[in-house]
Amino acid sequence: MSALDSREAPFDLVIRNADVATASDRFHSDIGVKDGVIVALGRNLPAAPREIDATGLLALPGGVDGHVHLDQPMPDGMRMADDFYTGTRAAVCGGTTTVIPFAAQVKGGSLRDAVSDYHRRAEGKAVVDYGFHLIVADPTPKVLAEELPQLISEGYTSFKIYMTYDDLKLSDREILEVLSVAREHQALVMVHAENSDCIAWLTDKLVGQGRIAPKFHGLARPAAVEREATHRAITFSELVDVPILIVHVSGKEAISQIRWAQGRGLPILAETCPQYLYLTADDLGRPGDDGYEGAKCVCSPPPRDADNQDAVWRALKQGVFSVFSSDHAPFNYDDPEGKKLGGKAQSFDHIPNGIPGIETRMPLLFDGVRRGKLSLHQFVELTSYRPAQLYGLYPRKGTIAIGADADIVLWNPEARVKINNDALHHAVDYTPYEGIEVTGWPVHCLSRGELLVSHGRYLDPEPGRGRFLPAGAPSLV
């Protein structure tokens, strides 16, 4: 760092000797920042009051995690471990500088009320910028005709719908109605694609046989139920003629449906997550000291097997996926409001669903760059550029360019780190990726030009410095 009177300098900050990588370009440059925005790229920029030497580091756009759950309202007796402070703290320590969690409507409730409640939960806590997706759980005529179109016009241009979970799932007719609103008002619908009736039938059979351990969660949600629902969602998209994004795709069965649709020119987008690259069904059977350790890996769709892991890696490299998200759904393990509801082990169908991953998302994928699984440009595209585009935040977020926010991560591509929960910054008492060694880790993380992580150390920025970002129309280009 250097000292210089800011009134004499054209920049507040200069990052020197940066090896800049975006979704399409790579070049060496200094980066000049003023008032939180990138205002210059070039060699030998004038001195600034603050300077960072990026020699030997990659300069990447800050990550945009387009699928996280933070402080989401839960049924009585259940609570998420991370709020907007601890969740965004963990995000930036892992190289993510923008998060987009979900304002979830409850059946019988107002979508507008859900948004107001979520703003209250975020206010004064987030340390990085954030937007909101909506979760549409009760598409009444008023929601479809009034609330949803108005919220889209106010910057909530993406929303999630579910084909499973009794308190969230929509009927086929309701899905078509929601897609029709999205088409008319230029919004993007994210779809959780699993067949609810198939899952309920399988669950009843397994529980009736006393097969209730965490490992049976995977048997209750086999790849076939994801494949069928994915095909059905694609059909609905085709009928309404509107793009959709199939979220948290777990393996080759759903991938085959998405490839088929994309090959026909249908506007089908897809997302996957770290759990489908690093976990398998065997992890649901982890015995642990209490025979319940597999609960740490219960998520939906569940992890599959090594063959499906390979299929997901291939699809990432081949461009089937547009987005790589964490699907961070943080529940403590040893907690009567978490995975051990009421203080005891639960039948698999009552284990809180979801796993943490907001801090480890980018390092886990970057390790794939080091192993030749995808290119550096694809890494940036999947973790930053494309989510910013799809969720209406580009070019403010998702790239290093003049006029973009100075959300920049200086990354050590050679750092070897063994993931250990004690070193992470979320409020969850475990990570499912414990002991996995990755190569590549963020060193310095800046949000709008403010250094929040320096030499890997979190600098305790003021809670609430993160800003809410109303979204523009999704860009599919």
Image (cartoon, grey):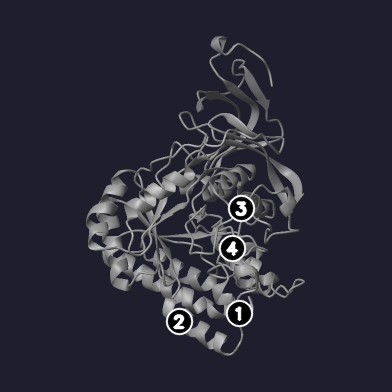
- Mark 1 touching mark 3, by CB under 8 A? no
**C-alpha gap between disc 3 and disc 4:** 25 Å
Q: Amino acid at mark 3?
A: Arg
Q: Amino acid at mark 2?
A: Cys
Judging by the rendered image, the residue that carries numbered circle 2 is 198
Judging by the rendered image, the residue that carries numbered circle 4 is 337
Q: Is residue 145 visible?
A: yes
Residue ID at (48%, 44%): 122
Using the image, determine if residue 266 lies above or below residue 205.
above
Judging by the rendered image, the residue that carries numbered circle 3 is 361
From this viewpoint, which residue is outermost toward the top?
A: 8
**C-alpha gap between disc 4 and disc 1:** 22 Å
User: In terms of depth relative to the viewer, which is nearer, 475 or 127?
Assistant: 127
Using the image, determine if residue 239 lies above or below residue 39.
below
Q: Earlier in the sequence, mark 2 or mark 1?
A: 2
**C-alpha gap between disc 2 and disc 1:** 15 Å
Q: Quadrant of residue 460?
A: top right
Picture coordinates of residue 474, whole percent (x, y): 37, 48
